[in-house]
Image (tube, rainbow, N blue to C red):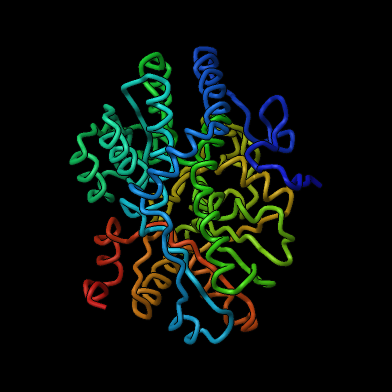
Amino acid sequence: MLKLQKGKAIIDQHDKHYLYGGKFGGNFVPETLKKPIEDLTQLFQKLRYDKKFIKERDYYFKTYVGSPTRFIKLYNLSLHLEGAQIYAKVVSDANGGAHKIYNAVVHALICKHAGKKYIIGDTGAGYAGKMLSMAAKKFGLKCKIFMGTKDMARQKVNCDAIRKNGAEIVPVDSGSKTLVDAVSECMRYWVSNCDTTHMCVGSTVGPNIFVKICAWSTAQISRELKVQLKEEFGEIPKKLKLINCVGGGSSAIGFWNEFMDYDKKQVEFIGVEAGGPKNSKLHAAPLTYNAKLGVLHGAAQYVLQDKDGQISETSSISAGLDYPGVSPLHCFLKDTKRARYTVATDEQALEAFKLVSQLENLRPSLEPSHAFAEAIKIAPKLSNDTVIVVDSCGDALKDKKIIEKRLGKLIWQH
């Protein structure tokens, strides 16, 4: 069995081929991308230990992003379920409404340090694109966002915000017209324009350097949470469960990062993938349903495939989780048994949103609603001295039309 190395950052637990556990991740890219990836790897390796760069990052996280985000107890939900104590890390408080802003700000700063004026990125739920467009505007960069036309239709609110920030949306009408195709088109564009353009991958996916930059950026979430837990309880609770939705996996890695060295009997990581529509064979849960190892977007990972090895179609009510692969870091955490993975269906996510929004002053987007579904499922079975923390990593504004259609317009009056 694979093992995590104690005291070593998870993003650095790869071999000389950039593979985690000898098989996940790597840089499976065309020859034309090897040099720009190597250059970016060297630049980031220098910047991540540079005190001035870290000070600059922390300054913008505090003054622009709005760190730290709230850590709150969900009293009504806890009482309703009569089991574990349930808390939320309200990362959706961050500027723009989601965790994607951390990665976007860091990439914009790297772009500036690289002396480039153009930045591109992919998006599914629209949050990564929205945040990158915000960061580009903040730092005076020209920005293009690649987005599947299916996602453009269901995430119009974020599309409007992207354009308002002065960025161009490049519609992607190939394949499933979702995130997987947007990432592919974004990478193709970078091949031809890497001399003048910096690429931001919106999650912990892709060639190794993009996994590392994103995880390093979102780790801010767990740095804050660790302090907040100690302030609330005087120590890290003896029975702590950290629940996060998992699509590409960026918010979960950021949520768990600072707790990697804790024994899983004390701090358990639970990742919740998209189970798709009830009574459908379609889903977006490669970890839960033991997908085969494959290569997608430059990295080896568990990826949904058909019998011929072609990428399978996925389905989820949540655009941010509608992805056939997953971060190599999550594959590594699954195989080391440090994290366990499960699913919530579209219907379970909707019911979780309904319950949380009715009982608490909180409206999680459909992505973290999957995580809340798992919390609602397990909390009644746990003792009162167990602490569950859910990463509420996005707000539901972008999903308003979907939620109104499925649950009715009255849901927004609570």
Please provide percent x and percent y for residue 341: 62, 58
Residue drawn at (43%, 25%) of the image: 187
Residue drawn at (66%, 29%) of the image: 18
Can I make out residue 277 in this image? no
Looking at the rendered structure, the number of numbered marks drawn on it comes to 0
The answer to whether 121 appears left or right of 50 in the picture is left
Residue 142: which quarter of the image? Answer: top left
**Which residue of the protein is positioned furthest toward the right in this rendering?**
1
Please provide percent x and percent y for residue 36: 49, 17
Can I make out residue 117 in this image? yes
Residue 231: which quarter of the image? Answer: bottom right
Residue 27: which quarter of the image? Answer: top right
Q: From what the image shows, is residue 20 above or below residue 282?
A: above
Q: From what the image shows, is residue 236 above or below residue 273?
A: below
The answer to whether 6 appears left or right of 92 in the picture is right
Q: From what the image shows, is residue 386 above or below residue 94?
A: below
Q: Nearer the viewer, residue 70 or 157?
A: 70
Please provide percent x and percent y for residue 363: 34, 67
Q: Nearer the viewer, residue 93 or 264?
A: 93
Q: Nearer the viewer, residue 61 or 39?
A: 61
Please provide percent x and percent y for residue 294: 62, 34
Residue drawn at (32%, 23%) of the image: 118
Q: From what the image shows, is residue 414 above or below residue 370?
A: below
Residue drawn at (58%, 28%) of the image: 45
Q: Quadrant of the C terminus?
A: bottom left
